[in-house]
Amino acid sequence: MEVTELLAVLMTALLVIAAATLVGPRLRVAAPLLLVAIGVGASFLPAFAAVEIDPELILAGVLPPLLYSSAVSMPAMNFRREFGAISGLSVVLVVASALVLGVFFMLVLPDLGFAWGVALGAVISPTDAVATSIVRQTSVSKRVVAMLDGESLLNDATALVLLRTAIVATAASFSVWGAVGTFAYSVVVALVIGLVVGAANLALRRRVTDSTVNTVISFAVPFVASLPASAVGASGLVAAVVAGLVTGVRAPRELSPQNRLSDSQNWRTVELVLEGAVFLTMGLQIRSIVVDVQEDHAGVAPALLIAVGALVLTIVVRAAYVAPLLRVLSARARHAEAMQPRVQSMHEQIRTEGAVGPFAEMNRRGRSGPSQLAAEAGPEGVAVPAPAEVASPSPSPRLGSGGSRTAPPRASRTRSRRTSSRTPSQRTPSRRTPSQRTLDQFTRRVTQGLADIEYFLRQPLGWRDGTAVVWAGMRGAVTVAAAQTLPEDTPQRPVLVLIAFAVAALSLLVQGGTVGPLLKRLSPPVDEAELHERNESERTRIFELMRASGDAVPAPEAPVLERSKEAFDASVAHTLAMLAAQRSALLDARDNGLFDADVLADALANLDASEIAIVLRGRLAD
């Protein structure tokens, strides 16, 4: 293809992506579905009759920036709160789905074998971050969105490691512990690389004041994380996700509003183009894959029937996993509701009397203290652990199921009698005076723990949410790209690739085409007045926090009414200091989970806009 033709194709693709994004909502059809259909239609044109996309281009060139961008924009507090469910969906469900599908493919495809069946199952098992963008356009619960987003960010690593392990098992003996070790190595090394790259990214970009240059550097970050991780055998996608999470959490404290605004606008454009390109190329390749199967005399119809069976099986396995998961989360929510008054009481005591008393009480109570209480309270565990700087006291009586105290173990009673028989001068102090840092950490974790409990009780998960989690688990770019990485000597390779493509296409068509109407039909009636009142209450609390933090900033020494350059500069500096104090207070509240993530994001965006406007006025005055 000549340069002029290539440029024409690229220009047309950009216009098609833009048109699908605008027209899709009007037709009540998700834009990805339109793009796949357009790609299939374009594949019949002579210019695209034999299009082949290198799968590494998707896995190593497209997915890292997409996952990085999603991680940057994902509310970190919601990710932490739902991490228990996310980790189960990302690891346990992927492994279970791959094994069940492995048995299915072994039975329906002659001479395939279990190992190759698991390899194809690993290809089909992960949900897709691009596909879940369809769900964000619906009225689904924010907890469901957090679970689906988190799952799609992390399950790729599980699937790709399982795929590599299954391929190795076809030529050598399989070791369960070897597979576990490979997975652990892949994730841990990727985690370390992602943390280092995320921190280095912020350290470098903090010193770059030019917004354009800053954004260009940000474009390189996902590859700086993913390529070294892949080179050492770790998960490049997990490394890119971790780097994105670090950047998303720390960027408001480290980078200027101008740089973050430039990042946000440019990355949204990159996401739109890359997501659209993924679905366009997916549609373009379907025809050539069907032709390969026909030339191999394998038969397209049987492959499509197997794909339908595989899709149904993935949905059934997902439902079988999500149902008990919801029961566990509901049980923990009820436990949290029972524990909430005690955590609330401790929080109020900290506010009125300081942290020393509650901290000492927690230390005396030991395992039945607030740390254990809060750790068991929330559905994902509310983090209020006892700080390590304080030595544990001698074992104390523990609370039984009915709130009564049970006797300590026999050895503990013996040690207790032995200790009590000593004179006061012989006894060793059981704890040291806690440092201020320890007390601050304790206060923050109690506050965070109480906010977590309120979050889970405010947004309980029911069968409607479970249905959304099951039906919104769509397949997409990862399945398409991973299928094409199967070795050339794979038995019935064209058929396996067609099955994977068909599962992804059917998933987008059936699940993606119906998830919106389904969720709208299942969603309970929303009390708009109550929702408005709750949001207004959140905004009022945010404004009160901003007012208090702004009032704490000392006023400028220069007279504010004096018409001079020095007075103007002093006023601008004072205003910027107030905005910085307000942003710091809001970010502390974000880290503690005190406010709704969306309402808080709006408040932070308003602060950024105010600061940008003030800086521009200052430049005009110069």
Image (tube, grey):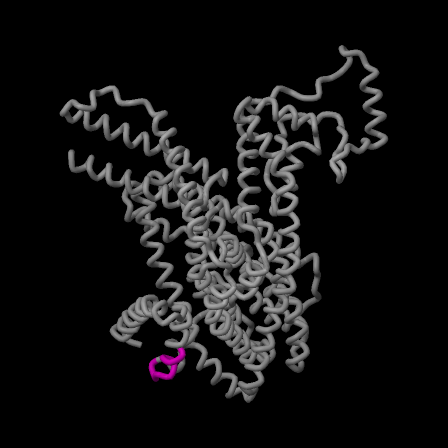
State yes or no: residue 43 in magenta.
Answer: yes
Above or below 412: residue 173: below
Percent across and percent down for residue 321 are 64, 61
- Magenta stretch: helix, strand or loop mostly: helix
Q: Horizontally, is 311 left or right of 264 in the view? A: right
State the residue at coordinates (24%, 37%). 615
User: Which of the 4 image quarters holds residue 399?
Assistant: top right
Between 257 and 187, the one lying in front of the other is 257
Q: Horizontally, is 94 left or right of 605 in the view? A: right
Percent across and percent down for residue 369 are 67, 32
State yes or no: residue 168 in magenta.
Answer: no
Residue bounds of the magenta highlight: 40-47
Among all residues in the image, which is located at the extreme left? 563
Q: Is residue 238 visible?
A: no
Above or below 114: residue 260: above
Point out the image quarter for the N terminus.
Answer: bottom left
Above or below 358: residue 291: below
Q: Horizontally, is 464 left or right of 219 in the view? A: right
Q: Horizontally, is 257 left or right of 566 in the view? A: right
State the residue at coordinates (63%, 30%). 388
Percent across and percent down for residue 325 are 64, 56
Between 4 and 449, the one lying in front of the other is 449
Point out the image quarter for the C terminus.
Answer: top left
